[in-house]
Image (cartoon, helix red, strand yellow):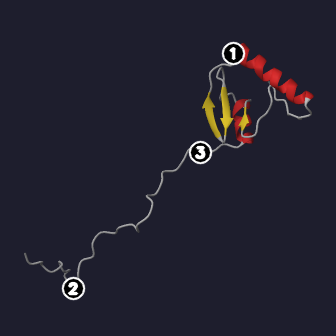
Amino acid sequence: MSSSPAPASATGSPIEPPYRPPPGPAPTQAGPYRFTREQYYQMAEWGFFQDRHVELIDGVIFDMSPQSSLHANTVMRCIRALDRAGWALAPVADGTAAQSGCQSP
């Protein structure tokens, strides 16, 4: 089987194949928008989260199920135990401890 010459343009130069990206990992899609703590609290003040339990985790706002009384009591017991051990935790409005990367308005 003979190979035919590459097609030529009107000027006689070979027609280039379509652009092909360089080899390597495929480009990734953009991730979710990451909110700052200030933006999150401002949204709460504006009423964005009316009647919803949401949390900001690593800049992403998640809908959360309501906290059960068992969970709330366990969190408070942990906070008290850590406080007695000398760990300083910054309380937030609902009485739980603020965690790095996780805030609840």
Q: Which residue is mark 3?
A: 33
Earlier in the chain: of badge 1 and badge 3, it is: 3
Q: Secondary structure at mark 3?
A: loop
Q: Taking 94 as reference, is 10 above or below it?
A: below
The numbered disc on residue 11 is: 2
Please identify the quarter of the rendering in which residue 69 is found: top right
Is residue 100 shown left or right of residue 28? right
8 to 34, vertically: above or below: below
Mark 2 lies on a secondary structure that is loop
Q: What amino acid is at disc 1?
A: Ser
Residue extending farthest to the bottom is 12
Badge 2 density bin: few <14, some 14–19, many ≥20, Cα 10 Å: few
Q: List the single residue furthest toward the left.
A: 1
User: Which residue occupies 80% across, 30% down?
Assistant: 97
Q: CA distance from mark 2 to mark 1?
A: 76 Å
Left or right side of 11 for 3: left
Is 62 situated above or below 12?
A: above
What percent of the width, then of the height, locates residue 27?
Answer: 46, 57
Q: Is residue 16 visible?
A: yes
Q: Which one is earlier in the sequence, the residue at label 2 or at label 1?
A: 2
Q: Quadrant of residue 86?
A: top right
Q: Residues within 10 Å of mark 1 (few under 14, many from 20)?
A: few
Q: Residue 61 location, x and y as percent?
A: 63, 35
| Circle 1 SS class | loop
Name the residue carrying label 1. 68
